[in-house]
Image: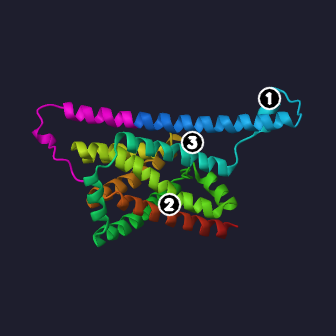
Amino acid sequence: MTTSPYDPAQAGDNAPLRAALSAFALDVVLAILLSFSTMMLGIFGWSAWRGVQLAQQGNDLSAAQLQSAVGTPPVLFLILLTLVSTGGAALVLYFWRRRATPIERSTSWAAARRPRTWWLVLLGGVATFLLSTLLTGMGRALGLDLTPSNLELIEAGFAQYPVFLALFAVALAPLYEELLFRRVLFGRLWQAGWPVLGLLLSSVVFALVHEMPGLNGKPATSTLFLIVVYAGMGAVFAALYRATGTLWAPIGAHILNNALALAVLQVYSGAQA
């Protein structure tokens, strides 16, 4: 992606900023609606299918008993549903709202061929991992519960489907997250001439998607600390995108960060066993 020719310092009013913020807010709302509705439809469909299965077995159950018998979806289903809901929302918003032009794609591929880009990817991925590890260690030393909300699902998935979970966590999740949070959201305000504001806002949204206050079952202090950690990661990825001019850079750094985190998690889990 190339930088925008628009210079906000030359603007006589705030109309362009308001327009960019409105478009950014609409992107966020659409992403939430698309992802949440797909997730709910998937869970409802699975529950209905389980209910039909139980009914065909001739079980004479009350509504409460039926609900208990249905249970929760299996781990693999939840992981696939996450991939479809969030990844699908990212693809829809990219093609509908922020599709790259031929010039942008050409510029991106040219940047991806520069050795400097991949040195920055290496630096960004390692720095992000070390930063999040340091901050998490500091928070735990203060007695905070900093276990990520998705850790239980990741551990259960890795125990049952290690190859698929590794592919999902290390490659697939970074691809659709960078497409949504950096290309669509950060890129929206970057192109409009406010890259710093875009970095801040997109990083906060990135953090809130991972740790939603009131829904993650954690105290407010722990949640706020986790939001700071995730926002810091998002800021590094956005800065890397801007510095290199190619989305492949934050994708690569995100993949490296997740690979290091998953490797440490497995070593730690093995030591605890």
Query: Which residue, given by chain and number where applicable, does mark 3 sit on?
Result: 216
Kind of residue sitting beneath label 3:
Asn
Contact (CB < 8 A) between labels 1 and 2?
no
Residue 147 location in percent, x, y?
57, 52
The crowding category of the residue bearing disc 1, from other C-alpha atoms within 10 Å (few below 14, some 14 to 19, many at least 20), is few
On the picture, is 35 further left or further right than 232?
right
Q: Amino acid at mark 1?
A: Ala
Residue at coordinates 39% horizontally, 52% vertically from top-left? 234
* 13 to 210, vertically: above or below: above
Q: Helix or strand or loop: what does disc 1 sit on?
A: helix
Amino acid type, mark 2: Ala
- Disc with the residue nearer the chain's start (2 vs 3): 2
What's drawn in magenta, residue-wise? 1-27
Say if 123 sits above or below 23 in the image.
Answer: below
Which residue is the site of mark 1? 64
Q: Earlier in the sequence, mark 1 or mark 2?
A: 1
Q: Magenta segment: does it hold 214?
A: no
